[in-house]
Amino acid sequence: MASSRLEINFIRLLSRCESIAAEKRGEAEWRLEKYVGALEDMLVALRKTPSKPTQEVLTDYTRKVDFLKGILEAEKLPSATEKALANQFLAPGRTPTIASERMPATKTVHMQTKARCTGEMRTELLGTEANRACIAAVFIRGVPLDERQSATELDEVLQHHHIMQEKLAEDMLHLARNLKNNTMAAQSIIKQDNQTLGQSMRQADLNFEKLKTESERLEQHTKKAVNWLLWLMLFLVSFTFISMILFIRIFPRLR
């Protein structure tokens, strides 16, 4: 089936968004968010067109758009640890967007984003280049010119690293606690749903048994009513016949 004009424009815009996502963007970069919003609108329109692609293709389009949305949401998180954790849950597309791609562009973007988040985490853990240079200078020179100043700088750098490590540990602990709470909440909801479903099934079985019993009783009453009606009709017919015979015998025909 030939692609419609809307699908061709969607593929072009999707390929452009994947290219922008693969680049290193600044905080003032606004195009990707606007483009992804346009992709969502086009995807909704594409689902409603008579010449829409197959369900498998639509699912892959949706997967790629959701991946780009996840990239944007992950970049808005405050810490590199949260960004890296959010990036782990993103699912890139499975097929290339355009024919010239050997590997899906979203997978490439996913790997680049992973590497970028790892670099940011390493930077937060080890500090800035100036701090690392200061540490190297302290240990390479051996005996500094001003021992007090060097010792103070070293203490400040070590304290900064200690604070950063504590912050990272707290972030990881906080994320693990949230994950545990969400898992327990999901298990509790599933357990309650199972209990409700079990009660509903038991109530349905009970209602079925009651309905069956009432149906049998109604059938018995119906049979009894039919029997009484039949006997009543027979009695009326017999009484009428006997009455006519007696009437004829008592009042003979006039001549």
Image (tube, helix red, strand yellow):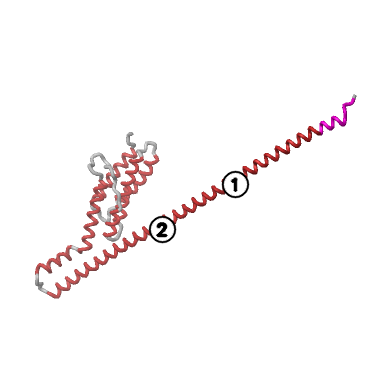
- Element carrying mark 2: helix
Q: Quadrant of residue 16?
A: top left
Alpha carbon separation for disc pair 1 and 2: 39 Å
Residue type indicated by callout 1: Glu
**Majority SS type along the magenta span:** helix
Look at the image and give the residue range highlighted in magenta.
Answer: 243-254
Closer to the camera, 199 or 224? 224
Residue shown at 21% from the left, 70% from the top: 159
Q: Which mark is residue 188?
A: 2
**Quadrant of the image for the C terminus?**
top right
- Residue 147 position (above or below residue 184): below
- How far across and how far down the image is residue 197, in percent? 46, 52
- How far across and how far down the image is residue 49, in percent? 39, 38
Closer to the camera, 203 or 236? 236
Q: Quadrant of residue 10?
A: top left
Closer to the camera, 79 or 55? 55
Closer to the camera, 63 or 222? 222
- Residue 144 position (above or below residue 19): below
Would you say 209 lies left or right of 115 here? right
Q: Quadrant of residue 158?
A: bottom left
> What is the total number of numbered labels drawn onto the structure image?
2
Would you say 110 lies left or right of 42 here? left
Residue shown at 62% from the left, 44% from the top: 218
Q: Which mark is residue 72?
A: none
Q: Which mark is residue 214?
A: 1
Q: Residues within 10 Å of mark 2 (few under 14, many from 20)?
A: few
Q: Earlier in the sequence, mark 1 or mark 2?
A: 2
- Callout 1–callout 2 Cβ contact below 8 Å: no
**Quadrant of the image for the N terminus?**
top left
Residue 247 magenta: yes
